[in-house]
Amino acid sequence: MITPAFELSQDADFLTLVIRVPYTRTSEFDIYIQGEDFKFYAKPYFLRLTLPGRIVEDGREKASFDIDKGLFTLHVPKETAGEHFEGLEMLTSLLAPKGSRSAKPLVEDTEACGGGCEEEEEEEEFDWQIEQEVYTETPAETLKEYHKYGFGNLRSGVFARLQEELNEVIDLKDPDSTAPELRRHNRLEAETTIFCADHYMVNLYEDEEEIRNLLKFKPWWRELSPDPSAHSDTSITFTEEEKEQMRKFTNCSYLLDKKARFHVWLGLVDIILAYVYDVRTTEGEHNVESAWTIRKLSGTLSWLETYHSVQDVLVSFGRRTLCYPLYRHFSLITRAVKDVACIFQSGKACILKCLLAIHKIFRENDPAYILNDLYITDYCIWIQRVKSKHVLELAESLHNAKLQKNHLDLELEILEQAAELALKEEADDEEEEEEEEEEEDSSSGSDSEDEEESEEEQPEETQPEEKMENNQTGLRTLETLAERQRGGEESREPRRLIEELGERLEAGLTIQEDVPRERHSISSSNTEGEGERKSEGDYYHQCAAENVRDTTKAAASRELLDVCLQRNPLRIISNDELDSDDDGNLLLTVGKGGP
């Protein structure tokens, strides 16, 4: 708490207190009057007095506050009319807590009870009240050593006593002893440190729909005529509350040199940029975070910054927009610049309406109200006296200003390129996975189709029915040859018939091993036993019948004939090799292996 400067005076009936409380809220004063005790509180000031006489609160008390001088004047009636209060000029004694004027003797006589009584040891009581010091005005020489800030750099020494209360208002530590160049250096360093690339990427790629909706929002200044230059400032209407606030302002003029006026114009652009961003991101409905957003995005309000060009203002606003608020998108920065250009193009009345809205937001926020005394109130008074041509010239400069991502020195383009590559690689991986899945599906489908085709189309040599037909054809040929020989027909062309039979056998006929073994045994027994031999026709009939039975059994048991690469040659026995009893008949034998 800060003990304010104060003065006391009196007349026969009233005690007058004049308390100096600059940069405080005019709507919040707490006063306590009880006998000799008087307490006054107006954040961040607190005053407690112990008066030499008694005062009373009976409805006759009066109070007034001079905003320009920051003086609070209170007239309190005395409890006893005509009583004279002594020692009102003794400020140190008035600030002392009640009861501290009288102290116990440092040495006491312990034998006052005759030594026979037992004294109860008393513990020393602590005074839990705040210790106060007398306010001393800062010398002019010391103020000259302080650096300037505020509207037009007209303030200094304000933060020397309010630093603890204003830590939540500004980011700059010890502004009175910090040069403007060092303020800028510290601001840039803090912005670079706090910038979060992940937050920026999330707003860029994942919050596209929400950002698009914010960009589509149409604020109240966009509802003005598309050609604001065709209308005067009277097209802007003010509410009754805004009119009442303007009546409370003191009509004064500001003596500013050319450099100071230039800084004031650029500071105004910086503050309005922060305001239009808050309006767009809240869609015109200010919330409890609006005061924080406006003062945080404005380098003028948070770092007491002074700019040297319009480009400096835009770069500072762009960097802070990508570092602090919830929505950190470059499109919101460029749209805010266009909004401010539209406001300045609409005239100084439109600017005044924005400043009054900011003044109300700060007035209702604790402790942002201090910024009204440093900047906003003076801007509201000053903007009403400027020439409209200067406003339009600044609007034209804002229209022509170009702000790019590389101007912000936050490596935005590199981050976006890296993100694009990562997204592209992810998309390629997904495409490869999809192609692999499609190939697996197609291969499994083709395998199933091949299996179905193989079941439907089997080779001719694997069909048992066709093999049996070939066997039957070969047997019919043997039967035909046997009939010709049995009928006595003379075999004039035996070689042709044998070649025909061989060609048919070459087509893939393979005789089972057990079949020719039986036939071979029958043939050998017929040749060795002349008495028991039968005619070649009977042999061939018997062989044919056995072949038919073997073929039938093979077909019934579903056993397929094996294709053999070795041929089963035929042995030809000529008439000379036969005995005379054979009547020249030709005997054909099928042998296994070579001839």
Image: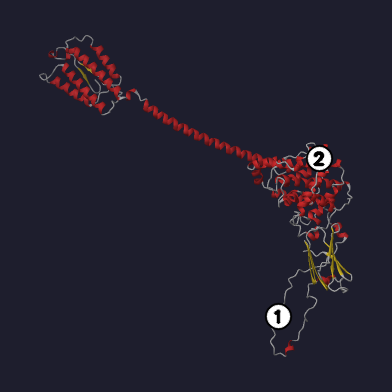
Give the image location of residue 44, x and y in percent.
77, 61
Depth check, front residue: 253 or 531:
253
Secondary-structure class at tag 1: loop
Give the image location of residue 381, x and y in percent.
85, 50
**In the picture, residue 495 is in which quadrant?**
top left
Depth check, front residue: 74 or 418:
74
Depth check, front residue: 433 or 27:
27
Residue 425 appears in the figure: yes
What residue is pinned by disc 2? 345
- Residue drawn 52% across and 34% down? 435
Residue furthest front as drawn: 59
Give the image location of residue 450, x and y in percent.
41, 28
Badge number at residue 295? none
- Residue drawn 62% across and 38% down? 421
Give the image location of residue 275, x and y in percent.
75, 47
| N-terminal-most mark, 2 or 1 | 1
Residue 307 appears in the figure: no
What residue is pinned by disc 1? 122
